[in-house]
Image (tube, rainbow, N blue to C red):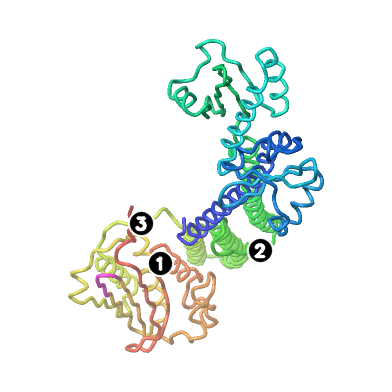
Amino acid sequence: MPLKFFLKLYSRLAGLTALVILLCIVLFVGMNSVRSQFWHERFSDPLMRWLASSPAPEQQYHWLASRYDFRVASAEELSGYPIVRERLGYGQVVAIESSLGYRFLVNGLHGEPLQFRASQPYRDIAVASAQILRVHLDAVGPEEREAAVRQLADGLNLGVLRIQGSAALPDEEVLERVASQGSAFYDSNGLGRVLVQLSDGELIQVSFAKPFNPWAWPVILLMVVISGSVLALALLFVLRNLDSNLRKVESVAVRIARGEMGARVETGEGTVVSRLAAAFNGMAEHIQRLVNVQREMIHAVSHELRTPVARIRFGVQMIEDCQSEEARQRQLDGIDGDIQELDELIDEILTYARLEQGGPVFTLEEASVTDIVRQVVAEQRILRPALSIEGEIDEETELLAMADVEPRYIHRAVQNLVGNAGRYAAGKVLVRCHIDEEHCRVDVEDDGPGIPEDEWEKVFTAFSRLDDSRTRTSGGYGLGLSIVRRILYWHNGQAFVSRSDSLGGARFSLVWPRRKPLEQSE
């Protein structure tokens, strides 16, 4: 995987994760601020309305003033809260959060705003409600206590239990606080409870609703839904982008199938399918090249085969008219030469086709390049005794002669160059071989007419010959140099032509790596 693509994907995932976390925090804080406001107002509602129902709550519950700052709020205190005053006018209980806790406000019977402060709202409201319960129960006799309990429980929204046996008693620490203070707040299974002792010694257990829970399941569910939705949208965007890129590849594949061989996929950097698009374009270019080669071969082969076939047909007809054995034998020798030419042409065509259509199965092995060059020079001297064919190999090259090659094909490439030089040379062909630690190089030079510079690339094209060689005096089919270039291509090398400084004719050069690449060897 490319590092750039990995970093781009990683940054997007990190950004998406940070966005989801930030969104969850915002939702959590925003929702709980509203939920907390609502819960505190609902939880304090019974106590505040009970206090507001009293004609003179400040005198009746005067003991609340010292601990909870229970009093009538002044107009100046509420001047900065227009919404609070409006809500109080509608008869609502209002909770105002501050750094010291909460202020709970409600309008009394005479329209005055009553204020109750709680630094720990759940505990303070529970304890204040229990104390009010105790005061009222102490004010009635034992026979009226049951009715008073029901009335207070309904009015203050309490759960009241008159403890009759030891089974319902809390632990000793709570009982000690009750004995010393008259009441004690404690927690039991997540619920707040207050144990109070009446003046006659009876114990009353007061229970309340659950405290505010910021991690309630609706909050968690909403965060999960929102997070899942964000992730789903991100996944949808990624898949939509991926699908769009794949559709582009599919569209180009359809166009190529219809015959538009020049169609290509637009490749972009850092995309999921960039490598696929690059590989697809490479495949398309290879297919286009093979189709063009096939088209050129069909056209050229039909042209190349026509001449020897015509000569064979003419020779067969001439045999019927020959009057002497000598003339008949001459025609048979001509036919045999044409058949040999056809055989060589077919061999060249098959070799070229095999190299063009993906190449043969190359098995590179360590072999002596200098021995291959000497072998070609020796063979060509026998075939062309009229020419001076020389090999030039320096001492350094001899020491580094071993290289990773496919001996048969390197032999074929050098042989094609030397044979081609021999057809055009006036009298001399020079084969130079130079090898260093990194590269192998073979130069074949002749003293012939040379090749114009504007034809240097054309000579490597299949079935391409210079105009002055079309008379067949020099022979060849226009495939030899194409085969040479393809052999060097499969050796990760190059074949090119230039002008010979020493002989004045053409110089063909082969250059390829001395050792195969590490990844190829693995």
Indicate the amino acid at tag 3.
Glu
Query: 246 or 142: which is nearer to us?
Result: 142
Q: Which residues are magenta?
A: 434-438
Q: Which residue is mark 2?
A: 263
| The quadrant where residue 121 appears | top right
Instruction: Look at the image and say whether residue 245 sits in the magenta stretch.
Output: no
Label 2: element kind: loop
- Mark 1 Cα-neighbour bin, 10 Å: few <14, some 14–19, many ≥20: some
**Residue that carries the numbered disc 3 in the rendered image:** 519
Query: Earlier along the polypeptide chain: callout 1 or callout 3?
Result: 1
* Between discs 2 and 3, the one toward the N terminus: 2
| Mark 3, secondary structure of its residue | helix
Provide the major secondary structure of the magenta segment: loop
Q: Amino acid at mark 2?
A: Ala
- The relative height of residue 227 versus residue 172 in the rendered view (above or below) is below
416 horizontally vs 197: left or right: left
Label annotation for residue 357:
none
Mark 3 is surrounded, within 10 Å at the Cα level, by few (under 14), some (14 to 19) or many (20 or more) other residues, namely: few
Q: Quadrant of residue 195?
A: top right
Determine which quarter of the picture holds residue 129.
Answer: top right
As for residue 436 lying within the magenta part, the answer is: yes
Which amino acid, mark 1?
A: Leu
Q: Are marks 2 and 3 in contact (CB under 8 Å)?
A: no
Where residue 492 appears, x then y in whole percent? 39, 65
Q: Which residue is mark 1?
A: 488
